[in-house]
Image: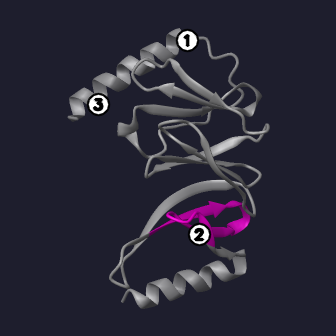
Amino acid sequence: MSNSELSSRLRRQLQCIQNLSISNWTCPFISSGGAFDSGLIFSRGKGNKLHVYNAETLQTVTVKETAGHGLISCRVHNDLAWIGCYDGHLFVFDINTFEKKDYKKLQQGIYDIQVYEDDSTGVKEEYLIFGQHFGHVDMIKVDTMKKVLQTKPLKVNTIFNIIKTTRK
């Protein structure tokens, strides 16, 4: 998609948003989950539920229950939406069926979700790194959805120093 097409789409979406009544939204969290081509927009809506909208029409695709947890982060990876809340709850939904695939309780509020790929062993392995409140970091292996690292703030600097050292 060219820059002018993207700009035109954004202007249309902004116009639609201006014409919509969003009085039922409880927070301005809105995200494409890093997958702009998925055609989906994820938002926290009334009752702290996950609202999923079609990016073209802004029509509701689905509303998913999150037990009232306030959603603040999102990453779409391998057709899964990884949704984090400010209390450390992590919800994983299939973006094709919107079936809940997994739930985990991490340490603190999940502010950022990043993909990390490691091929140092000759086999590409994918991980998601969860940056959390007070410097907590969790790491989950994507294919198994298992935690492989959970660290406290005092250990974070040590881990990053080890990573920097091994990449020199």
Image position, residue 106 (x, y; %): 72, 61
CA distance for labels 1 and 3: 21 Å
**113 above or below 28?**
below
From the image, tell me which residue sits under label 1. 20
**56 above or below 135?**
above
Image position, residue 107 (x, y; %): 75, 64
Give the camera-side residue of 26 and 78.
78
Give the camera-side residue of 124 and 75.
124
CA distance for labels 3 and 2: 33 Å
Mark 2 / mark 1, whichever is N-terminal? 1
Instruction: Say which amino acid is labelled 3.
Output: Leu
Label ID, residue 139: 2
- Does the segment drawn in magenta span residue 138? yes
Disc number lying in front (2 or 1): 2
Q: Is residue 38 left or right of residue 112?
A: left
Mark 1 / mark 3, whichever is N-terminal? 3
The residue at the point 72 percent across, 34 percent down is 65
Image position, residue 125 (x, y; %): 42, 72
Image quarter where the C terminus lies is: bottom left
Instruction: Say which amino acid is labelled 2.
Output: Met
From the image, tell me which residue sits under label 3. 6
The residue at the point 42 percent across, 90 percent down is 166
The residue at the point 72 percent across, 25 percent down is 46
Instruction: Say which amino acid is labelled 1.
Output: Leu
Residue extent of the magenta highlight = 126-147
Find out whether the residues at labels 1 and 3 contact each other: C-beta distance under 8 Å: no
Q: Main secondary structure of the magenta part?
A: strand
Find out whether the residues at labels 2 and 1 contact each other: C-beta distance under 8 Å: no
- Does the segment drawn in magenta span residue 105? no
Tell me the SS state at disc 2: strand
